[in-house]
Amino acid sequence: MTRILLSMLALSGALGAAADALGRIKLVTLPVRERVEIQLDHERATLVEEERIVPLVQGLNQVDFSWANTAIDPETIVFRVVGEDDKGLDPRVLAVSYPPDEPALVWTVASRGSGGARVRISYILGGLTRSFSYRAVAARDERTLALEQYMKINNAANETFGASRIWAGFGKQFLRPIGVNEQREVQMERFADVPVRKTYTCDVVEFGYLDRPQNKLRVPMHYVLLNSQEGGLGRAALPAGKVRVFQDDGQGGRAFIGEDWGRHTPLDDELRLYVGVAQDVVVRRTIDRNTRKARSGDLFDLDVVLKYEIENFKSSPVTLDVVEDVNALLAELMGQQPREAQWELGDETTFPGGADAQGTGARRVLLHAPLPPRADTGAVEKAVHKLHLRIRNLW
């Protein structure tokens, strides 16, 4: 437990010699904390600021601060006199000393008079940490959701704090006591009617196959939220944390869908929440053509066509996002290559709109396939799309 121990020595006349002999005098009565503020905005460092009314006498005073069994970083301890000096004390810190082999330090404080002075002591404290979690409840139609954000404070610092002002670095502040080895959870924010977009994605590199012998790809589903004011959020970056996802069951209850680990999401960025694998969207991926075209010397190009046979057994239309990593495709066809693939989209590509300009990069191509719902009779229309790639300058 941290404690402030005071000794007051008036170094004048004969008392000066007595002071040298007495050294540090520890008092039994400790000044209580008048105010505590805990800042948890840094993931690995917690800043604590505490204010106390310290009684001073005219002359020189010694303020003893010790922190046995508490993970205070001694290099970060700062002592400041704050508030109005209405008593004319004019307190000033003259020196600081560190007793050997003891978790303590001593400030020498000069005062022009006697009375109480408000001081602020700040330090970095280990063992006092925070983590974030979320609870998302999607509407029945999966077009909006309610998002609740929680912060859990874990006090393993071997220190008790009374009513303390707690701030996470964003959002509102909370006034809460925190006991030793106590965990305390507070709700930070609640966002209602957040627009959400449900996506269906196949990516053989990231998600793999659901049934490799039949070339069936796994199709994970995600809820996608935009951390912006237009997206119903946008007050601050969303820290990483576990997200438990529910859905309104239409009968006054909530069905648990699953949980995901939400990544740190800056403003104007997207948060993707995994909500399971689609069983009613079936995708078969095959290599329809793989031919070499000689260029000069040992150089050649690959002309590749990938075929996707897609069936939507849902009663509503969906759009399937199809992702191909061209480097991984080249390794699938020829083994691992020593350099990045040089490629271009061929004219036999049948996906509407071609490659997505925003989602396509140097090695990744993103395409979209709109799928009609199943018919009222239960019949399902099979959509067939092709991706045509020319991979150049191979040897």
Image (cartoon, rainbow, N blue to C red):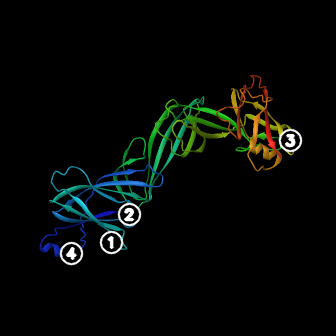
Q: Indicate which disc residue 296 carries.
A: 3
Labelled pair 1, 3 in contact (Cβ < 8 Å) = no
Labelled pair 3, 4 in contact (Cβ < 8 Å) = no
Tell me which numbered mark, 2 or 3, is placed earlier along the sequence.
2
Query: Which residue is denoted by mark 2 in the rendering?
Result: 74
Label 2 environment density (alpha carbons within 10 Å; few <14, some 14–19, many ≥20): some
Q: Secondary structure at mark 3?
A: loop
Q: Residue at x 60, y 28 (%)?
A: 141
Picture quarter containing residue 74?
A: bottom left
Q: Secondary structure at mark 2?
A: helix
In this picture, residue 242 sits left or right of residue 128: right
The three-letter code of the residue at mark 2 reads Pro
Residue 98 at x, y = what percent?
A: 33, 69
Query: Which residue is denoted by mark 1 in the rendering?
Result: 99
Tell me which numbered mark, 1 or 3, is placed earlier along the sequence.
1
Label 4 environment density (alpha carbons within 10 Å; few <14, some 14–19, many ≥20): few
Most foreground residue, 24 or 342: 342
Label 3 environment density (alpha carbons within 10 Å; few <14, some 14–19, many ≥20): few
The three-letter code of the residue at mark 3 reads Ser
Residue 118 at x, y = what percent?
A: 24, 54
The three-letter code of the residue at mark 4 reads Asp
